[in-house]
Image (cartoon, rainbow, N blue to C red):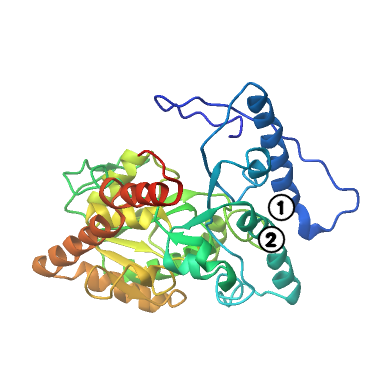
Amino acid sequence: MASDFQAQLPGVDQHSYHFVTRGGGGSHPYLYEPNRAIWRGQAVLAHCTELARGGYRPDLIIGHNGWGEILFLKDLWPQAGVVGYFEFFYRGQGADVGFDPEEPYSLDDVARVRTLNTINLLGLDAVDIGVCPTAWQKQLYPVEYQNKLVQIHDGIDTERACPGSARPLRLPDGRVLGPDTPIVTYVARDLEPYRGFRSAMRAAVEILRRHQDAHMVFVGGNGVSYGNPPPSGGTWRNHMLTELSGQLPMDRVHFLGKLAHQDFINLMRLSRAHLYLTYPFVLSWSMLEAMATGVSLVASATPPVEEIVEHGYNGLLVPFADPGAIADGVLETLSMNEVQRRAMRRAARQTVVERFDLQWVALPAWQRLLRERFQAPL
């Protein structure tokens, strides 16, 4: 694990590795990320070689393939079973690239993302079996590797992410929003186009115009986790505030930055309508955790969201790039009677409990995999 990892788990010895990326004198720009991953893999191999010299012989190795750490461990310990977590296979068509009409792309971009699969393909050859979190993410991988992959989600702690009483939300300016306030929430790691921030902000104009008591609460950082920064520089938050200058009642638009997990859960319990938008990309834990708290969900009709959300049953599906339709979905949710609202919220939670619960679904699936494939004594 990288040296900045701080979590401590009982009964688990923690070892840190250090790596330094070295340039490849004149190497191609497409190779920037694969180059970093290989340096990481080499650093982990060097550290594990020292463990092997001390007599350490693992029976089983489980790791995330995406950053290269597990690439070479089967070469050091060929007798060990190796399970890799495979999150996303890059595609020039049919996924995130070319999805957003506001994000032009070129053949050069398609070639670049193909090259990003270097580590994916090396990893598929280096592991005994791989795990993908959703069916859509699994089917992105080449057909010839499908029999080497199984679908198991990471799991949601539905005892922690659950309905319950909520503390009022104290805003930075000292105002307090309580359960009687129609709060519309949006949550992402960073406020950026991949997670529909532009569409959410544009929809907010109509939501707040048509519902005079509603407040929009945005949670997320001002960086870029995926995709590109605004063409003019700065943050997407400031970019959208400039675009919508004079159209938003800023006394009812609130940016909270990043929240501690318990504060996120509390906010979901307060939320009257929760908005989740995404490119066809990695599914966010936040959507499933929000559903587990029993939110009224309005989500984009994009993969892999459509794998989880059934329109009118456990949420509403709306077009990703249509702010008017998004606003209609949120306003429909806000106008539901109590019977409708409770039924949809109950179904949202039940979906997560039945399909994604950590203790009763995800962990047992992992245990079955390890027992059946590697005869692990679990």
In this orientation, which residue lies closer to the viewer: 7 or 70?
Answer: 70
Q: Name the residue under label 2.
A: 116
Q: Which residue is drawn at 31% across and 76% down?
A: 328
Q: Where is residue 364 in the image (x, y as percent from the top left)?
A: 31, 49
Tell me the amino acid under the disc marked 1: Glu
Residue toward you, 216 or 97: 97
Query: Vertical placement of 214 versus 142: above or below?
Result: above
Q: Residue 33 carries which label?
A: 1
What is the x, y in percent for residue 44? Answer: 66, 36
The image quarter in which residue 88 lies: bottom right
Residue 69: image location, x then y, percent: 63, 42
Farthest residue toward the top? 54
| Nearest to the observer: residue 131 or residue 158 | 131
Classify 10 Å Cα crowding around label 1: few (below 14), some (14-19), many (20 and above).
some
- Tags 2 and 1 touching, CB below 8 Å: yes
Label 2 element class: helix
Q: Residue at x 33, y 47 (%)?
A: 363
Disc 2: CA contacts within 10 A as few (<14), some (14-19) or many (>=20): some
Is residue 282 in view?
no
Q: What residue type is labelled 2?
A: Leu
Q: In this view, does 75 lie to the left or right of 198?
A: right
In this rendering, position of residue 7 left or right of residue 306: right
Relative horizontal placement of residue 180, taking residue 26 as reference (left or right): left
Classify the position of the N terminus by image quarter.
Answer: top right
Give the quarter of the figure containing the C terminus. Answer: top left
Q: What element carries label 1?
A: helix
Displayed quadrant of residue 166:
top left
- How many numbered circles are shown? 2
Find the distance from the CA under tag 2 to the CA under tag 1: 7 Å
Q: Residue furthest left?
A: 339
Question: Where does the image place residue 72, in percent across and percent down from the top left?
Answer: 68, 44
